[in-house]
Image (cartoon, rainbow, N blue to C red):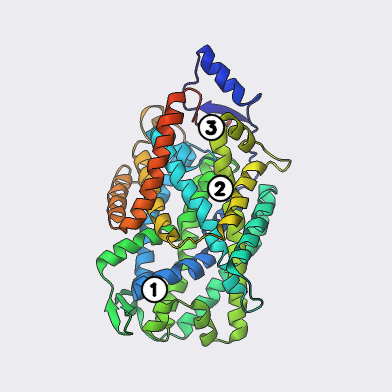
């Protein structure tokens, strides 16, 4: 069903062959294509996890951007259309569980691909436990739990689910997804039904100051907030990570990416607009306590229902993020990014066809991270996502060179204008981020570059060999 295409020329020298063969006695098994566009969209939407994004990430934006939050998310969603075009073309051109790093390595060089891998690993390893810790807040109407303990439990549950067959997980996450969409719809209906201000408030650019008076949100503050706004719908890239397990990836990857972005943008943006218009006053909006607003608009029973739906949404997000992250780690081991013993362990597949050792390696540390102070997470994540998109856009600009020009793949409209404009906008957004977050991300990137220079590059004939399984039709 598959044949293996390796984008780098394999070594012919005897020493290189000897070192390569010592990595594994046989080639790692391939992930099986078991899901169609519906299952892929359900899994990808669950990774975007619109409800948990709405209730966990958006309140921080309300705190800093006030009435400009909806406008900022809308601008971010428009920018993400260009990003989605890049992902759709590259994901069908390079359908690999390695996601961004496989695409960028193949088209822009292995060092660029390695840096994308590190940035993506930084995002996908830290975000799940932080979102998981929010579970305790939304279970509070039923039971009071320590946020760290609740988050660790969610991560362990997600890890167990991640060991199952991907088709089974598509159904599990699909059920949870329905509940979180219902919760978002309830918030939207209640917000619009209790509107305190008109649609003009969405562009009034006001936030409640420390003294309780209205302050103006500057354009520069909106630009700074775009890094987080890009992160709000970031999960649509999961379709690329699942490309090795999607049936007919040349067609379904693009469909899944674009459908997920459209659906998630609506699910998130409509309730944000409703909340902005329905908050009793500017101070309440800036406070960002959406659960309290829902209770004030209705009653405690409805507030409890919404809170429990959000808790399920967070669990859902944890499951899908563990699935996604384990595929990235599995692919990096298959592509020999690490010393031989590590590659051997992480490239193992279990009885259900899932990379079980990589799943455990992602989930268990995620549970431990729930006990770590991660105050700068959102800032570092925003910088990492922006940097990752910047490198993906660069790869998209290079996607029609040489043999790739004639490869059967989905092709974006308005190329190369789309990636060029995206590169310019993302570079500007990156330049407006806080120095602390830039330094944290820059330090991690520098350490990754050092690993590349000292370990991977000297072994370039036997390490970081990007493999891209393809279906026979390609």
The secondary element bearing badge 2 is classed as: helix
Give the mark nearest the N terminus, 2 or 3.
2
Give the mark nearest the N terminus, 1 or 3.
1
Q: Which mark is residue 335?
A: 3
Residue 200 x %, y %: 31, 79
Q: CA distance from mark 1 to mark 3?
A: 43 Å
The secondary element bearing badge 3 is classed as: loop
Residue 118 x %, y %: 45, 43
Q: Residue at x 40, y 34 (%)?
A: 111
Out of 130 and 57, give the one closest to the viewer.
130
Residue 256 shows up from this direction: no
> Tag 3: Cα neighbours inside 10 Å, few (<14), some, or many (≥20)?
many
Give the mark nearest the N terminus, 2 or 1.
1
Q: Residue at x 65, y 63 (%)?
A: 175
Q: CA distance from mark 2 to mark 1?
A: 30 Å
Out of 316 and 444, give the one closest to the viewer.
444
Going by the image, does 325 lie left or right of 461? right
Image position of 315 with respect to 88: above or below:
below
Q: Which mark is residue 63?
A: 1
Quarter of the image that includes the N terminus: top right
Asked whether the residues under the numbered discs 2 and 3 touch, taking CB atoms below 8 Å apart as contact, a structural biologist would say no
Q: Which residue is mark 2?
A: 325
Q: CA distance from mark 2 to mark 3?
A: 15 Å
The secondary element bearing badge 1 is classed as: helix
Residue 140 shows up from this direction: yes
Q: Residue at x 55, y 54 (%)?
A: 44
Residue 392 x %, y %: 39, 43
Image position of 11 with respect to 264: above or below:
above
Q: Residue at x 52, y 15 (%)?
A: 15
């Amino acid at each position: 069903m598959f044949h293996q295409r390796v984008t780098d020329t394999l070594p012919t020298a005897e020493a290189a062959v000897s070192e390569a063969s010592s990595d594994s006695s046989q080639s790692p098994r391939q992930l099986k294509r078991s899901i169609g566009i519906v299952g892929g969209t359900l899994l990808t939407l669950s990774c975007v996890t619109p409800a948990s994004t709405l209730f966990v990430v958006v309140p921080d934006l309300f705190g800093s951007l006030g009435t400009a939050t909806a406008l900022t998310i809308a601008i971010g969603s428009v920018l993400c259309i260009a990003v989605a075009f890049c992902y759709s073309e590259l994901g069908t051109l390079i359908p690999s569980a390695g996601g961004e790093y496989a695409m960028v390595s193949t088209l822009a060089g292995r060092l660029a691909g390695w840096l994308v891998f590190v940035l993506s690993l930084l995002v996908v390893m830290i975000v799940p436990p932080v979102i998981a810790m929010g579970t305790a807040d939304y279970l509070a109407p039923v039971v009071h739990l320590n946020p760290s303990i609740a988050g660790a439990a969610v991560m362990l549950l997600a890890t167990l689910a991640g060991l199952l067959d991907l088709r089974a997980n598509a159904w599990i996450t699909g059920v949870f997804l329905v509940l979180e969409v219902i919760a978002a719809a309830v918030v939207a209906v209640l917000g619009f039904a209790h509107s305190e201000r008109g649609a003009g408030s969405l562009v009034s650019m006001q936030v409640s100051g420390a003294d309780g008076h209205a302050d103006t949100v500057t354009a520069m503050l909106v630009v700074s907030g775009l890094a987080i706004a890009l992160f709000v719908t970031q999960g649509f890239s999961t379709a690329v990570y699942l490309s090795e397990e999607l049936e007919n990836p040349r067609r379904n990857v693009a469909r899944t990416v674009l459908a997920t972005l459209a659906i998630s943008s609506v699910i998130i943006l409509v309730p944000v607009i409703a909340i902005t218009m329905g908050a009793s006053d500017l101070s309440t909006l800036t406070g960002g306590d959406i659960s309290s607003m829902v209770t004030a608009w209705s009653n405690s029973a409805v507030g409890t229902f919404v809170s429990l739906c959000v808790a399920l949404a967070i669990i859902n997000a944890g499951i899908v993020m563990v699935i996604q992250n384990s595929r990235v780690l599995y692919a990096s081991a298959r592509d020999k990014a690490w010393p031989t013993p590590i590659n051997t362990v992480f490239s193992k597949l279990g009885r259900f066809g899932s990379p079980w050792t990589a799943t455990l390696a992602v989930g268990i540390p995620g549970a431990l991270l729930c006990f770590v102070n991660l105050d700068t997470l959102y800032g570092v994540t925003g910088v990492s996502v922006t940097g990752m998109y910047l490198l993906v856009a660069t790869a998209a600009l290079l996607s029609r060179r040489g043999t790739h020009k004639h490869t059967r793949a989905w092709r974006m409209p308005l190329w190369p204008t789309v990636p060029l404009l995206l590169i310019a906008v993302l570079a500007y957004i990156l330049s407006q981020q806080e120095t602390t977050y830039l330094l944290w991300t820059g330090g991690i990137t520098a350490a990754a570059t050092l690993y590349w220079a000292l370990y991977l590059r000297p072994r370039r004939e036997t390490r970081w060999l990007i493999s891209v399984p393809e279906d026979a039709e390609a």
